[in-house]
Amino acid sequence: MLDKPLSPLEAKQYSPLALAFFGDAVYELIVRQRLILSSNMQAGKLHSLAVSKVRASYQAMASQELEDHLTQEEECIFRRGRNANTTTVPKGVTTAQYHMATGLEALFGYLYLIGDVGRINELITLIWDLED
């Protein structure tokens, strides 16, 4: 946790790709935390389940599910991340999916930086049981 959360204005000063860089770690940590707390299983199984929820295609689908649940400010952060110019797209994912995933990661990075972990948990709860 941050010693002192940033103000929304301070957090918005970061580039969308910097927010996504940070949000990727936040999102994966929350996914891993939920998995480990939900059941005690072998590390290999935990890893497989985590990968299924952190891959770009799942994040893209999740971002579509959240569309109607975001505040105006959250939509703005998401769009900044989605519309950011990325230089590469991983194999096995479309450019559109990758951009949607980047938007979601930017949103999670922003929310963490402003200290809104409660909202992060609300959003994760909305997308947790989606089937890819």
Image: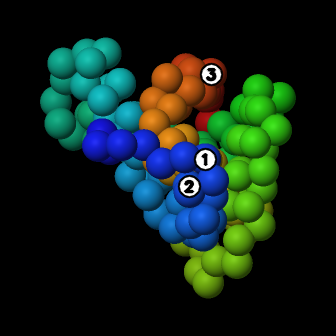
Residue type beneath disc 1: Pro
Residue at figure coordinates x 21%, y 40% from the top left: 44
Residue type beneath disc 3: Leu
Secondary structure, mark 2, is: helix
Q: Residues within 10 Å of mark 1 (few under 14, many from 20)?
A: some
Nearest to N terminus: mark 3 or mark 2: 2
Nearest to N terminus: mark 1 or mark 3: 1
Residue type beneath disc 2: Ala
- Alpha carbon of mark 1 to alpha carbon of mark 3: how far? 23 Å
Q: Residues within 10 Å of mark 2 (few under 14, many from 20)?
A: some
Q: Are marks 2 and 1 in contact (CB under 8 Å)?
A: yes
Foreground of the two, 99 or 40: 99
Residue 24: percent from the left, percent from the top? Answer: 46, 54
Residue 47: percent from the left, percent from the top? Answer: 29, 41
Task: Provide the residue designation for mark 3.
Answer: 126
Q: Of the numbered discs in the image, which one, if any, rests on residue 11?
A: 2
Residue at figure coordinates x 83%, y 29% from the top left: 68
Residue 77: percent from the left, percent from the top? Answer: 70, 52
Q: Quadrant of residue 132?
A: top right
- Alpha carbon of mark 3 to alpha carbon of mark 2: how far? 24 Å
State how the image is colored. rainbow
Residue at figure coordinates x 35%, y 24% from the top left: 34
Task: Provide the residue designation for mark 1.
Answer: 8
Q: Are marks 1 and 3 in contact (CB under 8 Å)?
A: no
